[in-house]
Image: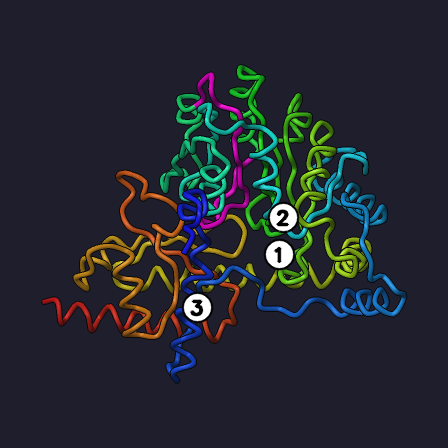
Amino acid sequence: MPKVSNRTAELGTENAFVVLAEVNELVRQGKDVISFCIGQPDFATPLNIQDAAVRAIRDGKHGYTPSAGIPELREAAARYMGALRGLTIDPAHVVVGSGAKPFIAYTILSTTDPGVGDEVVYPNPGFPIYESQIKVCGAVPVPLHLRESRNFAFDPADLEARITPKTRLLILNSPHNPTGGILTRRDLEDIAAILRRHPDVWVYADEIYSRLVYEGEFASLASLPGMVERTILSDGASKTWAMTGWRIGFVANPALAEEFTRWVTNTDSCASHISQWAVVEAINGPQEPAAEMRRSFLERRDLIVGLLNEVPGFTCKTPGGAFYVWPNVTEACRMVGAQDSEEFRKRLLNEAGVALLADIHFGSRVPGEGQHVRFSYAASKEMIEKGVARMADFIRKGTRKAA
């Protein structure tokens, strides 16, 4: 049997889907599991968007589109991204893809060369595909630690210390997965000041949760002087309009739009024609459904943070955005005799029927930061209350056993 390549053998994954498979198997066996592991809205895509997709089908929108996307969506996305960030974006600088995720790889492939030591700085903990794609593209991953004491932002001095003559790309993610942390305008001004001293470094701004900010206003690095030309703005439809399975994302950058278009041509050919028309409606149509989803997420955030801070051994900061919390469970692990957060996660799933993700699913643990887990609160209030109660009961029972 021929063997697979080393590149493929070492390719990472997104553990939310791995744990989801575990959950689905337990459910198939008849187990009652409350899941907080997957990061997708639990709402239906708004009806006006569904109707636009049906019209596209009936109107014969079945064929290939230009690799960069249909002009109507590029124009809508340019207006949408620009309005949110205080920028004027040329539709010619916008490229549409099958979700925002492919542009992580396209950006790394467009800004680094394999085997020469080119470095990419990325947030840790962070979306696991960052590190996975950095490695598989042949670049060197350089983790930038997020600190609980800074509400899961990083110290700008730590960023400056990690930039070397080999640094080609910095990945920023705000609001952030998995912590829910946000980069404030002051944070971004500090980052911009550093980057102005390093003009050869590109920035990939993963802003897929841009409409899910609860503390202050959304801020983007690209809005600061001198940053838009070197920043790849990444956004999409998945989180804002509950369209994860429709697979439409978009990026904007004046210098790399043509390069990204060629990458799309070489991989997907184009994004789904039908889905593109649905997203035109999502952007141009009424925004009240998106606003209502945001209001619901905010209520759930406040609910889950309050409940988790009452669970023995838990401390949970209030996240500024997205739909995740990242509680510290160092003491809870000690109380139930779990070696670390991953053992705690496995026992919680198998003994209490509660599914979540451990910190190691998002990179190496940050030194001195203790143990953490991630909850996605894209779940009903009833499920949040029931799941947290199960977990608290598990810890109380486990503490008695450990004693």
For the image shown, how many numbered marks are present on the structure? 3
Is residue 181 found inside the magenta-colored segment of the image?
Answer: yes
Above or below — where is 149 with respect to 53? above
Residue 235 % position (x, y): 65, 46
Name which residue lies at 25% across and 53% down. 330
Image-based side of 235 in relation to 214, left or right: right
Callout 2: helix, strand or loop?
loop
Name which residue type carries label 3.
Ala
Name which residue type carries label 1.
Lys
Q: Which mark is residue 301?
A: none
Q: Quadrant of residue 373?
A: bottom left
Name which residue type carries label 2.
Ala
* Relative depth, front residue between 274 and 346: 274
Q: Main secondary structure of the magenta part?
A: loop
Q: Quadrant of residue 94?
A: top right
Name which residue lies at 53% across and 41% down. 173
Separation (CA) of disc 3 from disc 1: 21 Å
Separation (CA) of disc 1 from disc 2: 11 Å
The residue where tag 2 is placed is 100
Q: Are marks 1 and 2 in contact (CB under 8 Å)?
A: no
Query: Around disc 3, counting alpha carbons within 10 Å, would you say few (fewer than 14), some (14 to 19), or many (20 or more)?
Result: few
Q: Indicate the quadrant containing the N terminus: top left, top right, bottom left or bottom right.
A: bottom left
Residue 230 % position (x, y): 64, 26
The residue where tag 3 is placed is 21
